[in-house]
Structures are given as structure tokens and as C-alpha cells.
Amino acid sequence: HFLEEKTRQIKQFIGKQPAASAAEKAASYSVHDFVTPRSYACEPFDLNKEMQGMKTLVDSLLPPNKQPMRLVQWSGNTLPFEGAIRAARQAGLYNINGGDSRFDREFASYAWVAPIGQEVGKERQIYSSNSNENTYTELWTDRFYGFRYLQRTVENTESPIRVKPFNIYYHMYSGEKEASLLALTDNYNYARTQELTPVTASRFAYLANGFYTARFIPAGKKRWEIHDRGGLQTIRFDHGETSGVDFARSRGIIGQRHYQNSLYVYLDETVTTPIVALKENISYDSPLIEKRPYLISSRWLIKSLNSEGKHLDFLAWGYGKGAMSWRMPARGVYHIRVSDADGKRLEEMDMETDEHHELSFTLLNESYGIIRQVEISPKRANRAKKNKE
């Protein structure tokens, strides 16, 4: 009966049933017209207890080596009011959910793709990147296979230009039915075929806020200082197919990559005010060989890059195996060493660049979000062979 009543309330909220009577509303606690029974409440609603009290309680239950709670995920109608978002922020919490982006045959337009977030008074709500299984299953009443069509939204928001990340947003009840479970596993299998950099939901909310706060200050011809970017570490220059990073005039740059006629630039999060300078009239069809190594792509996040000639070291962490590619200044065989935070050696390998100076390798010792130290240097045999020649 509880689930039936909840379903009735949700359908009522979206207009599928007549509005509740005045008597029903008077007997309930209402937020944004979403009728919420308070019959079992032991005390009045308290925002401070909902946010700061919740965080304090959750943090007290965590093992000593775990990070504190950093995120609140809005439930129900996902329409928090300004005071709720403010209370979350003051408790040191990022926030996420809402938006319900769809772009498929049923919702065949960019008009159904939500922005990164919305302003709520003087506060900001960050939206989830894609909709969950509720909108694909008529609020969990029909078409339980429907969530598999998430893949169409992912494809349509990736091409012809990327407007959304890949997000699989679901509830545990997707495991209730065979059709919904198959839809979920289909989405995971599809994700495994894509070139992704997995991040936690709290980190996504952190970087999404940076989209709104980042400021570009001109610092010369095609040169900008980037201020107040928060967690935002990737900058995209559209129509940048003939542009490239001018590393000699830049600071705090880890990598660059051309994709869909745009230039993506990856920043080092340890550099508070990076500088991006661009050079023009480069050849889009040939690789950019620079005097220093730079990142092309990585499944793991990277920071604290130190680069001197052909040598480089950096910190990396992520989820799954650490596949990455670097563009090196010279072709040859390079030695790669991976250590933990205490300097204990975890793995080593020798890898050779291809004809385009690209050094690709996969770190097999999975990080699970724990930072690794990575060092890359030319193998000594390369230098000996060069001296002999």
C-alpha cells in the first residue's frame, strides 16, 4: 500500500491525476506541491539537522581512512528550494540531481537536454547528466526494458559535438525485473566500449560548479589566465582545428587533443592560475610534436606534472586500469615506473612510441581512487644506441 500511495502521489504531481483536495493538502506537509506525509515525523522539519546533522552522522560512521561525506543527492521531485541548497553548501556539501536529459526517438530534440545546472535564488543546483530509469519506464510501471535506450541519448549528445558526459543513473530496484536488469547491464557493456574517464559524482558536481565560476583574463595575443575554475580542468576551444597549445607561453598545461574540430586543453589542478596560449596555422591532419611531452588521453585523472625534456613524472588516480597516451618529443623506448604514495614500487614496463611519437600504455595495478606516482623516462639503451651511431 505504501508503494501504491507513493506512485499515486508522483502521478498526481506530473498531472496524470486530479490535484489533491484542500483537505488532503491541509493534512500533509507540502514542498513545491509534492505532497509529503509527515504522519510519522517525530519533530518539526529542521534544515540544519537535514544537512549538517546528516553529514555529522554519516561521517561518524565512516572508517578512519575514508573521505568525509561530500555530496547530497536530491531525491523525490529533485526541486530543492534555495534554503536547502544553501544549507547543503554551508555544511560543506556539493549537490546534484534533476535535469532528466533525454535525446532519443521519444524526445527527439536538444530542447530535452538539460543544462549543467540552474540558479535557485542565489544558490546553484547541479543537474545529473542523464535521466534515470524512471522516465524510460513510465515511473516504473511499464516498459521495464526502456532504460537500454539511454545509449541513444549518449550518442546524440556526443555527436556532432559533445554536450554531455556519459552517466548511468539508476536505482537498485532496476534489479527487480529481468528486463530492467538486462537493460542496465547493456548500458554497462556499452560504456566499456567507450573512451571514458570515470569520476565520482561528488567530483563531477565540483567541476560542474567550476563551469559557472571560471574567468578568462586576457594576457596577450591568444593568451589567457584562468581564474576561479574550482574543479574544472578541461577547456574546449571550438573551431580550433588549426590551433594548438603554445607551451612556451603557457603554464599549468598537462595535455591537448583535437576532437570534432575543437581543441581540448587539460589543466593541472595543482596550478592555481594556469595560462593557456594558442598558436595558429597548424596542420590538423598531422600530430603536434612538441619539445616537451603532453597528454593525449587518459582513463585516470592526472595532476602535479613535472616535465623536463623527455622525462616526466606525475600523480594519477582513477577507476579500472589506467590506460593513457602521451605525445613524446622523440621516438624510442621509454621506461615507465609506478609507485604508491610511500614510494613502494608497484609495476614497471618498457613501451615504444609509434611513428607519430605516441606512447600508449595501460597501468594494470588498479587505483580504486588511490593516487599513484608515475615516472616516464627514455630507456638507457636508446641513449647508448644514439651515441654509438
Image (cartoon, helix red, strand yellow):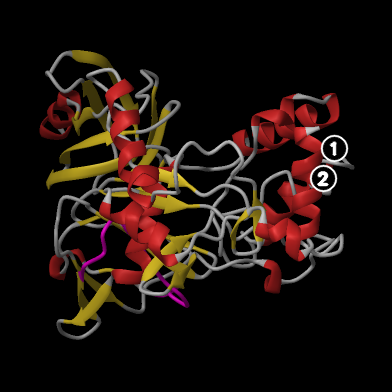
Which corner quadrant holds the N terminus? top right
Where is residue 182, by image quadrant?
top right
Characterize the local packing of mark 2: few (<14), some (14-19) or many (20 or more) Cα atoms within 10 angstroms: some
Q: Is residue 340 left or right of residue 57?
A: left
Distance of label 1 from label 2 (alpha carbons): 5 Å
Work out whether residue 135 can be spotted: no
Q: Residue at x 20, y 20 (%)?
A: 340
Which residue is located at x 17 percent, y 45 percent?
A: 305
Q: Amino acid at mark 2?
A: Thr
Write down the residue under mark 1: 144
Position of residue 386 relative to residue 278, above or below, is above
Query: For the magenta stretch, what is the residue range?
Result: 227-242
Q: Nearer the viewer, residue 179 or 274?
A: 179
Q: Position of residue 319 (x, y in %)?
A: 42, 30
**Which residue is label 2 attached to?**
137
Would you place residue 216 above or below residue 203 in this image? below
Residue 111, given in percent of the width and then of the height, sits at 69, 74
For label 1, the SS is: loop
Amino acid identity at mark 1:
Phe
Q: Nearer the viewer, residue 281 or 381?
A: 281
Residue 72: % across, % down: 42, 45
